[in-house]
Structures are given as C-alpha cells and as structure tokens.
Image (spheres, coloured by chain):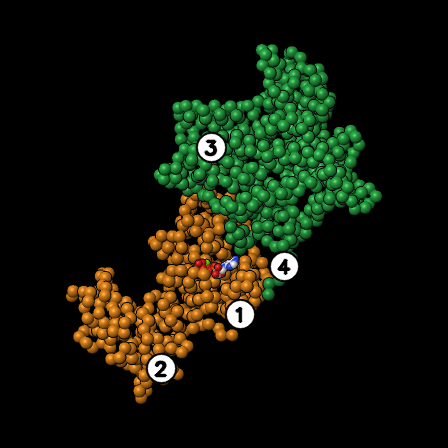
Amino acid sequence: MKKNRLEIWTFVTIGLLFLFFIFLIYPMFGILKQSVISEAGKFTLNEFAKFFSSSYYTGTIINSFKVTVAVTVVTLILGIPLAYFYSFYHLKGAKFLFVTSVLCGMSAPFIGAYSWIMLLGRSGVITKALAAVGIKIGSIYGFGGILFVQAFKLFPLVFIYMVGAFKNIDNSLLEAAESMGCRGIQRFFKIVISLTMPTVLAAGLLVFMRAFADFGTPLLIGEGYRTFPVEIYVQYLGENGTNHSFAAAISVIAILVTAVVFFAQKKATDRYKFSLNALHPVEKKQAKGLKGALMYLYSYGLVLLAYAPNVYIIYLSFRNCDKSVFKPGFSLGNYRAAMNKLLVRSTQNTLFLGVFTLAVIILISVLIAYLVVRRNNFANNLIDTLSMLPYIMPGSVIGIAMVIAFSKKPLVLIGTIWIMIISLVIRRMPYTIRSATATLMQIQPSIEEAALSLGSSKIKTFFKITVPMMTNGIVSGAILSWVAIVTELSSAIILYNNKTITLTMSAYVAISRGNYGIAAAFSAVLTVLTMCSLLIYLRISKSEDIKI
Amino acid sequence: MSVGITIKNALKKFNENVIIPNLSLKVRDGEFFTLLGPSGCGKTTLLRMIAGFNSIEGGDFYFNDKRVNDLEPAKRNIGMVFQNYAIFPHYTVRKNVEFGLRNRNINSQEIKDKTDRFLKLMKIDQLADRKPDRMSGGQQQRVALARALVIEPDVLLMDEPLSNLDAKLRVEMRSTIRSIQKQVGITTVYVTHDQEEAMAISDRIGVMKEGVLQQISDPKSIYQRPINQFVATFIGRSNILEGEVQVESGQAYLVVGNKGRIPINTIEQKNMENQKVIVSARPEEILLCKDDTGILQGIVKECIFLGLNTHYVVELETGDLVEMTQESTIEDILSNGTKVSVTFNAEKINLFGKKDGINIMQGVCNDICIS
Ligand SMILES: Nc1ncnc2c1ncn2[C@@H]1O[C@H](COP(=O)(O)OP(=O)(O)OP(=O)(O)O)[C@@H](O)[C@H]1O
Ligand SMILES: [Mg+2]
C-alpha cells in the first residue's frame, strides 16, 4: 500500500491553516463575540436590538444597499457599451482609452469625491461660474453625489471585465446570428450579452462589493446620507464616545448582507454555465458615419470626464492655497507644506507597505493555488474556502476585527505597520488566489511530472517549473492589487497612526482638517505613483491586457 | 547500468473503480517491451505506476531487486515521454533537453555536447533556441523524446511517443529510438496503438484488455499464435467462424459447415479430443479453390484490386461474411456474385477451445507469470 508520505506540502498546509486561524478566524470570531457579549461578560443581543429598533441605524444599511444597487446598475450601463465599442470597432486611440479608464479605476477612493466637490460643490468652481450667469445646478451631496462619483470610479472594472469576455466570443457565432436575421440591438442583447452573462454578473458583484464597502466617497460627499461604513467608523471613534460592541454588531450585519448578495450572485451565475473559446475572434469594424461619431463622443466623453478629477487635483496641487481657500497664482507651496506633514514618511510607508504586502500575497496565493489544485484534500479545500471569506468583508469590518483581536495580549500588533500589512493581505488575497488557481488549473500536471522524472526534486520542480509557468497569470492580477493596496483607505483609517501613515491617509487627514492645498499635493503624488506603476507594468508585460 | 522491471500482483484503483485488478509482469534487462491494448485499458496507468506518478493500491514493483513502490520518481532514474508531450513552455527547446542533465553532476561542456547530439538525432537542431509554444505537435513530440533519451536513463517509459508524426518521420524516428535503446541498453516500456510499429520495434509485446494482460510474447508468435480470440482480432485482422474438431485414430480434422473437413496436424497433443472450437483465420489464411474442392461454398460480395493482392469479401454458406486476401493473378478478378469454394491454410489458422477460449495449437507462447 502506498503510505501517505509526509512531504513538505503537508507542513505548508499546517502553516497556512495556523496563519488563517490567527489572522482570520480569530479576529472574525472576535467581532462576533464582541457583538453579542455585554461588558459584564454576558450573552446579549442588545446591540442588535438597538440597531434594529432604531430607523436611524437600519437606515444606514438600507441607504448603503440602495445606493450600491444603483451604482452597480449604472456602472454596468456605462461600462458595457464602452467595452462593446472598444472590442467590436476600430476606435482611434483605443489604447489611450483603455489605459485612461484603467487609471480612473485605480485612483484613490476619495479623490473623485474631493475633486468633484471642488468643481461642483457648494463653492465649486463650476457652480460659481454657472451661478454667475444665472444657472443653478442641483446639489451634488447625498445619494446623487455618491452615485455620480462611484459610478465614474467603478465603471472601468466593468469595462476591463467585459473587454476580456468579448475577446472570447467567436465571430462565427455573430455571423450565424446575423444569418438568421438577428442583428443590431437585438443581436447585442440576445447574443453578445447572453454569451457574456457570467462576466456581467461577476463584474456586477465586484462593483457591488467595492461600492458597498467604500468609505471615502460617502464620508466626503454623502453629508446627510448615512451609509454603514461611515457609521461603523463613527461608532468606532465617533465624537460621542467609542462603542466597539455596536460597531461589531453593525459589522456582523454588513457581512450578512454581503454574504447574501454573494450567494445570490453565485446562484444566478450557475444558470449560465458554459465556456467560450474563440477560434476566430471578432473582426473589428470601422466606426463610420453618425453612428461612429456618437461612439467616439460617448467613449472619449466618458473616459475623459471620469479622469477629470485626477487632472484637476494635480492642477490644484500647484495652486496657491491658504488652508481651505485657493488663491490665484501657482507655486510649490502645497508640496512644501506637505513635506512638513510627513510627505516623505508617507511615501516611504506607502511603498514599503505596497511591496511587502504584494510579495506576501503572491507567495500565499501561489502556495494555496498549488495545494488546492495539486494536493486536493479536505484541509486544503478548507484553506481555499477560508481564503475567500475576506471577499465579503468590507474593509472597515476587517479594520475593526483587527483592532478587537490584536490590541490586547497575547498578541499586540495595533499601532505597528505589520497590522496594516496583515489587514491588506487579508483584503486583497482572494483576488490573487483566484487568478493563481485558475492559471494553475490550466497547466497540465504531466509537465511537473516530466521534471520529476528527469531527476528534479519536488522543491526544485515547484520553483523552476510550476512557479514560472504561473507568473503570467499572477502578474496580470497583481498590478490591480498593487494599486488597491497603495490607495487603501477603509481599513487603514482604523489602523493607521502617525508612524504608519500612508499617502492616502495623509491626503485624507489633510482634507478632514481643511488643508485643501496640502491634500491636493498628497493626492497628486498618489495619482502620479499609480500612473507610473501602470505604465511600468504595461512596459514590462508588453501587452495592454489587464486581468482581474 | 540497465535494470529489469518486476511487477508482482499490481492493483490500481481510482476511488472505487478497479482499473488494474492483479497484474504481474517481468520486463527483462535491456528489453524493448511494448504494451498494446484498446483505448482505456490501462496502459498509461500502468506506465505511470512504474514511473511512480500513480499511487499503488497493491502489489510490488521492483527495479532489479530493489522495491521501488515508495521511491520518489526523481530518484528512479527513468526517462519518460508523456502522451501529451509535457514540454516546459517557458524554456527553449535546448533548455528543455538540457533540463535532466542539469539535475545530474555533469560539466557544462558535456551537457552541451550531449544535447547537441540528441537535438540532431531528433532533427530539431534548427529549433534549439525557440520556445515551444508555436511548434507543431510533431516537433514538440521530438523535443520530448530528446529530453527523455538524453539522460540515458535506466528505464525508458514512452507513452505513444510517435503518435503525432507523419508516416515517414514515424518510421525514421522509431528506428532512431530502437538504435539508441540498443546502443545504451535501456530497458524500455513502450505504449502504442500502432500494431505495425509494435511489431517492428519490440522485443516482446504484451497485449492488455481491461487491465488484464492477455499474452506476452515476441511479435511473431503473437501474430501467428495468438492466445485467444481477443488477441487474434486485436492484432491484425482475423475472421472468426464456428467449427468442430474431430479426432479419428490419432488424426484430427476440422469441420466447418456441413460438407467437408480438412486434416489438422498442428494441434497440441494434450488438446487432441473431439470438441467445439472457434476458428480464427486471417484473410491470407483462407484460400480460394478451383472447382468445387474446398470445404465451404460461398458467393463473392465485394472485390477490391490492391495491386500485389486482391481483397475479397465472401458470404459463406454458413452465413458468415469473411475477408480474404489473394495474390493477384493475371486472369480476370472474380466479379460480385461469383460462386466460389474456399478452404483454410491448415498450418496457419488458429483454433480456440470453445470452453475456455484458449488456443489449442502447438507453438503458442505466453510469458505471463502465473502467480
Ligand atoms: N486520474 C484518474 N482518475 C480516475 N480515473 C482515471 C484516471 N486516470 C485514468 N483513469 C481511468 O482509468 C482507465 C485507464 O486509463 P488509461 O489512461 O490508463 O488508458 P490507456 O490505456 O492509456 O488509454 P489510451 O490508449 O486512450 O491512452 C480509464 O477508464 C480511465 O478513465
Ligand atoms: Mg494512454
């Protein structure tokens, strides 16, 4: 009989389970416990009762849900046509469109909100200019503002997903449909959208999760429209005293909501199980005539409008500014002031955090992918399932969980940069694990066996054969993780301190203190940083493909 | 150093499905051994058990006297050519071929020389610096071959290594494989679907059905004296008819149909008794008779002139359709509907006892170890 040989992978399994237990299960459990145990140490559902008995609190979840659904629908409506035009027609400057919209999706969570307030807010430049000629635009605060800002920030996710899906549509399918008299709009819905429905749903889910958990936008532009990530934060360190238990209860409720949406999406996706594989990719048509002109107008209009906030921020960063009032004339004053406000430290922290976190994520993802695909057993499937948990956990919830778990003995990590790394690893891990697993599934095991048969040890085979074959799949996902890490706000705001402050946090702190010029300087540095990362990535990978 | 492979009572299950129930086999030192069998019978599975990639649910595997059940594949000193090539996509052809050598302590000059030699032998030296992703199936297959051969392993395991080559290249490559194998004396287990290839290349052939070895023997005796009906029909073509053996005063006769009978002198002594048999006759072992002198009558249903031979399909009086091959004659070929009379080449045909299905003729050779 073959004995189950003890091999190095067994130890990897044990090690990962151990880490997951400490940094994922234990904090989650902590949140759950905190939400149902009173200060006296008794079991109580008081916090939940408090939440559900007050429409003030239930309203936050309902508000979040409403605005998030609206955002999801609008991003799909914005993103799908753009992806369609991009994939089915020759548009001049297509690469520019692609890169710019990716950049929109990569900007820091609050830059959009902040910048649009500067333009369209109560004392915004455009608002004032229009008021001077007698035009009044409505308020951009509240529901409409959140929807507007998030939709412009998140539609690129839909765009990237859909471009990938459209690539897999076989031209002959379209021709077959056309030969049967199905064309134009009808063909778009019956064939193109039906075929890519799984991707539409996947993109929808991703947008939902991002928008639901977004903290920066509603905080800045939401005003009276209260959403739950803000509420958690307020409860956690609000003016009227901190209440961890109540924050924990809201967190539990939020996780339940996202879990329901997650499983509903899974169910919906099951109805569309088929695989596409294009032997003959779609041939792009010329965009001509009025139709072509409208396509150009739409594509460039959308992308430029969405990117405008980033440009405007960079512009503002060079304007003279005194606290919250921008003055005429340009200078580097904002940057000088930012230097005094930890610009260097923030940048260093941001880079260190980004590089280190990404390295850990990639290492863990590769290991987990290998265990799940090549050493499929109960323990490894458990690891896989656990690793997906953070997908449904909003950033602020993870932040709270970390505080609850690691601010007391035996393991005090709060206040160190490690806790920020851990929470970021947890947050971004599910995405990279998915892409690593998908990549490895497509690699035949016999390639590794060939290496073994040629006398290469297991370890050597893993590093010389398996890992290099996986890199393509991982790197394409890593760039998005990188940017998300660098621009992280919702968990960082709970975990940061003066020593571990990042660029995003510095910008946020400056905004909240009314130092608008300094905020613009920080944001500009951040924007340039993300832009450079993307350009370097495109340079290295020599392709314009970005997978999520 | 080459090794003999001994397999005792191997058992292979995937979950609860028994794929190989109880297989024993000895592959001799330096031998070229071929596994033949229908798709799904377990050839790849057995090969992978020898290589150490499949778990073994029962039995023992030995390389010489060393039990290898628990030895890592990397330490078995094998070369393996996979059914799906398994080329490293991120390495050039040269690096693929060098890979095994680099895992051994060999100096770089020697690595280069050996690699060059095998790249040439496999006619892929022009491709040396290309990545494999845009290479044809046949080219990839030759890279896989070179990679397995270059390390001059103790045991070479090949899973349909020539399946993707054109006919000419296939014949060329098989003689290359054969000569390298002989030169170095590598014990080789080879899997193929191509019977002609198996005949041409093998020292011995093992025919497998549903995880059970039916017969192990040299190509000639497998073809001429198949152990049972399965082997007879799987290797080459055979017509199967019902018949009867009658023994009269020490002389055996074969009766087919209800008219004539022919004397048979090649029945194994211990099987000399009256019995029902299955007659297995290859197309060239059924003969056309002039006039009415054959033991069976029939009507020509189809005839195809193939140059050297002419191929007929004849419906016999027993109702069976048989295929026969005759050397082409200068006279007109028989047209459809012609009445003919046929007999058998008594020396060459095979008879299987109806009871156990085993060949009752002399000269049947089967090396299966009964254990
Ligand atoms: N990993 C596996 N899990 C379950 N069943 C398997 C596995 N590998 C092979 N089998 C089954 O074992 C049987 C033998 O498969 P095997 O690949 O050895 O056939 P083969 O003789 O090599 O066929 P072919 O000539 O088509 O390559 C098949 O029924 C196959 O479905
Ligand atoms: Mg096979």
Q: Chain of mark 2?
A: B
Sequence-wise, the earlier of marks 2 and 1 is 1
Rendered orange, the chain in question is B
> In the image, what residue type sits under mark 4?
Arg
Say whether marks 2 and 3 touch (CB < 8 Å): no
Instruction: Judge the density around disc 2: few (<14), some (14-19), many (≥20) Cα neighbours within 10 Å.
Output: some
**Cα–Cα span, label 4 and label 3:** 52 Å
Badges 1 and 3, same chain: no
The local secondary structure at tag 3 comes to helix
Tell me the number on the disc at residue B275.
Answer: 2
Residue at the spot of label 3 = A84
Q: Nearer the viewer, mark 2 or mark 3?
A: 3
Q: Nearer the viewer, mark 4 or mark 3?
A: 3
**Mark 4 Cβ inside 8 Å of ligand 1:** no
**Cα–Cα span, label 4 and label 2:** 55 Å
Furthest residue toward bottom: B249
Q: Nearer the viewer, mark 4 or mark 2?
A: 2
Residue at the spot of label 4 = A5
Question: Which x, y percent locates residue B215?
Answer: 43, 70
**Cα–Cα span, label 1 and label 3:** 61 Å
The local secondary structure at tag 2 comes to strand
Sequence-wise, the earlier of marks 4 and 3 is 4
**Cα–Cα span, label 4 and label 1:** 22 Å
Q: Which residue is at 65% across, 57% downward?
A: A6
Chain A palette colour? green
Front-lying residue, A307 or B76:
A307
